[in-house]
Image (spheres, rainbow, N blue to C red):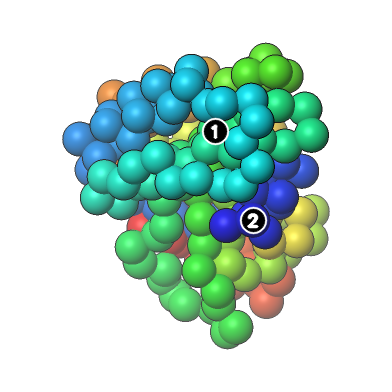
Amino acid sequence: LTEVAARDGHGKIGTGRLMTDRPNLLFSIALFALACQVVPANAQSVKLIGEFRNWSAYSATDSVGPVCFAMSRPTETTPTPDGYATGYLYLTNRPSESVRYEMNLVAGYSFAPDTPATAAVGPQVFELFTQGDAAWLKNPAESETLAAAMRAGTSVVVEATSDKGIRIVQT
């Protein structure tokens, strides 16, 4: 978790397709928002706040203050790329930096260079930019919209192209 929190602090994301059901997502986002209100400023390690089905919520403190994030792993990766490591989707809050619902994804595989990806929640599709094994919202101003779509939707579907030219979908 320490490595993940550090990567998250740098805004690293990967792509894939992640699926959750609505009650899981709603509970996790609510737990995540609550946790960010109560994180002690002197916390020194990543702490698990709670788990609900496919989502886990954590708190930590970095050099500028509290960091809270909700995390989910894909339930399916199709096709499974060679050398695949587990992927993670994060929603991160950094209250001291006025950052809310920053979405990032660590895919578990490397993306094709300079190739965008997409994250879809129901009919809404969000463009992502990729670097290495990570992806972020191309337009950070869409963070609140993405979080709202996740609260209202049933799944997050991320599609991307691997460095081998293979289209990957994670559920």
Q: Amino acid at mark 2?
A: Thr
Q: Visible in this render: residue 149? A: no
Query: How packed is label 2: few (under 14 Cα within 10 Å), some, or many (20 or more)?
Result: few
| Of residues 136 and 10, the one drawn nearer to the viewer in this rendering | 10
Q: Which residue is mark 1?
A: 68
Q: Which residue is mark 2?
A: 2
SS for callout 1: strand
Residue found 53% across the figure and 37% down from its top: 59
Left/right of residue 25 with respect to residue 99 in the rendered view: left
Q: Visible in this render: residue 86? A: yes
| Of residues 107 and 43, the one drawn nearer to the viewer in this rendering | 43
Query: How packed is label 1: few (under 14 Cα within 10 Å), some, or many (20 or more)?
Result: many
The x and y percentages for residue 77 are 42, 68
| Of residues 45 and 156, the one drawn nearer to the viewer in this rendering | 45
Q: Earlier in the sequence, mark 1 or mark 2?
A: 2
**Is the Cβ of the residue at disc 1 closer than 8 Å to that at disc 2?**
no
Number of numbered tags placed on the structure image: 2
Residue found 54% across the figure and 33% down from its top: 68
The x and y percentages for residue 53 are 24, 50
